[in-house]
Image (cartoon, rainbow, N blue to C red):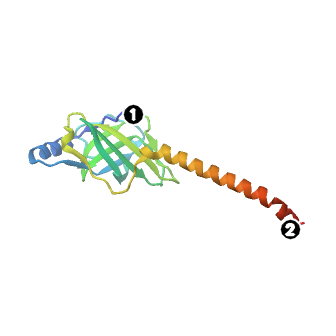
Amino acid sequence: MSDVEPIKPTITAAGIAKARAATEGGFKVSITHVGLGDGAGAGYTVTRGQTKLVRERLKVPIGGGEVIGEDTVALNTIIPPGETFPIRELGFYADDVLFAVWSESIELAARPTRASLILQFTLRLLGIPSDVVTVSTSGMSLNISIAPAMTDLSLAIVQLQERSLSQDVARFSDVIRSTYR
């Protein structure tokens, strides 16, 4: 993860209050969902007082994640196919509270129309102790760190199938020619 530049969202006032209550009450803030929006066509300057995204288009559960450093959390989620839009704002929710917000003018990605998209985020939660934050997942396994190995395995299977098919064609070509003359 060291080569990944973390997203540095702004912790909202409600997020700070939730973290303070968690610290005082001896429990953790659980990040449960990510909201994706188009920022009404542009990125914007996030404020601590935000209680919603400028234009949230989709809210999805966190698929997997963990606290990976003193103030760093890794999250991933599946974005289902649907009406496409540029993702220019993200909202990280602790249940129904908008805990943190990120926005930029350059789109992070676009929601695909025909295939699911797996997004992985590395968040720096500046000013919030990591022992107060946890990640609540939807239960679906999204371990994308094995993606390169799965790609290699898929390629090997396709190459094996191609060799087998080539051998079958070579072995049966004379039989097929004599049968269909």
Viewer-nearest residue: 158 or 134: 158
Q: Residue furthest bottom?
A: 179
Q: Which mark is residue 55?
A: none
Residue at the image point whose x is 35% and y is 43% from the top: 90
Q: Is residue 90 left or right of residue 133?
A: right
Secondary structure beneath label 2: helix
Where, by quadrant of the figure, is residue 68 drawn? top left
Amino acid carrying mark 1 in the image: Val
* Whether residue 14 is visible: no
| x and y percentages locating residue 97 in the rendered image | 23, 49
- Who is closer to the viewer here, 91 or 178? 178
Residue 4, disc: 1
Mark 1 crowdedness (10 Å alpha carbons): few <14, some 14-19, many ≥20: few
Tell me which amino acid carries mark 2.
Answer: Thr
- Which quadrant is home to the N terminus? top left
Write down the residue under mark 2.
179
Image height check: is 9 above or below 53?
Answer: above
Farthest residue, direction left: 24
Q: Where 72 sits versus 151, above or below?
A: above
Residue farthest right in this picture: 181
Q: Nearer the viewer, mark 1 or mark 2?
A: 2
Mark 2 or mark 1, which is nearer the start of the sequence? 1
Name above or below for residue 168 compared with residue 8.
Answer: below
Q: Position of residue 117 (x, y in %)?
A: 46, 49
- Whether residues under marks 1 and 2 lie with C-beta atoms below 8 angstroms apart, the answer is no
Q: CA distance from mark 1 to mark 2?
A: 60 Å
For the C terminus, the image quarter is bottom right
Image coords of residue 85 (percent x, y): 46, 47
Residue 129 as seen in the image, left or right of residue 168? left
